Amino acid sequence: MRKINFGVLTIKDIAKALNVSVSSVSKALKDSHEISEKTRKLIQDYAKKHNFQPNPMAQSLRHGNSRSIGIVVPEIDNPFSLRSLMELSLLQIRNSTTSAFHKHMSHTRLKKGIFNI
């Protein structure tokens, strides 16, 4: 089964394009001394030219820390909730974190079948 990556450049793509190992790409992007200067420069130049951006989810698996915040709010159209989410989003951009927002319906609204979708 072929994986779809939606045009996102991965270290595997770089390795294939340059005929080097994935490990070499990873080390070059971390500026490791374990590979030659020539190979490191080749990989870094290719990554820069093709606007390579590290995948935060892949990095979180390696570090064991997702730097993600889950948030449940009662009503997203409530001015306080909306303002809080906007401020949190700005903080997350500055601190390179991600979040998942979920709107929670109260038990009463679910029971009555009241939905604002």
Image (spheres, grey):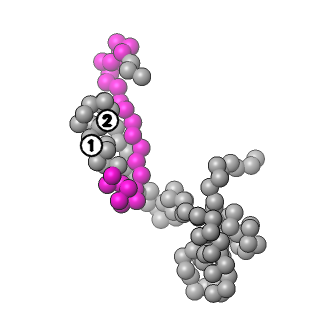
Q: Is residue 80 placed above or below 12 in the rendered structure?
A: above
Give the side of residue 86 with respect to residue 42, left or right.
Answer: left
Report how far apart the C-alphas of labels 2 and 1 lie in the structure.
Answer: 10 Å
**Callout 1 amino acid:** Ser
- Residue 91 counted in the magenta span: yes
Query: Which residue sits furthest top?
Result: 112
The reply to whether discs 2 and 1 touch (Cβ–Cβ < 8 Å) is: yes
Residue 36: image quadrant is bottom right
- Residue 52 counted in the magenta span: no
Residue in the picture at 74% in, 49% down:
2
Query: Which residue sits furthest left?
Result: 80
Residue in the picture at 47% in, 65% down:
63
The tag earlier along the polypeptide, 2 or 1, is 2
Counting other residues with Cα less than 10 Å from the Cα at mark 2, is it few (<14), some (14-19), or many (20 or more)? Answer: some
Quadrant containing the C terminus in the rendered view: top left
Viewer-proximal residue among 66 and 46:
46
Counting other residues with Cα less than 10 Å from the Cα at mark 1, is it few (<14), some (14-19), or many (20 or more)? Answer: few
Question: Is residue 48 visible in this depiction of the protein?
Answer: yes
Residue 79 percent coordinates (x, y): 25, 34
Q: Is residue 76 placed above or below 117 in the rendered structure?
A: below
Q: Mark 1 points at which residue?
A: 84
Badge 1 element: helix
Residue in the picture at 27% in, 37% down:
81
Residue 4 percent coordinates (x, y): 68, 48
The label on residue 20 is none
Give the side of residue 98 with respect to residue 88, left or right.
Answer: right
Q: Name the residue under label 2.
A: 73
Q: Is residue 88 placed above or below 105 in the rendered structure?
A: below
**Callout 2 amino acid:** Val
Magenta-highlighted residues: 90-114
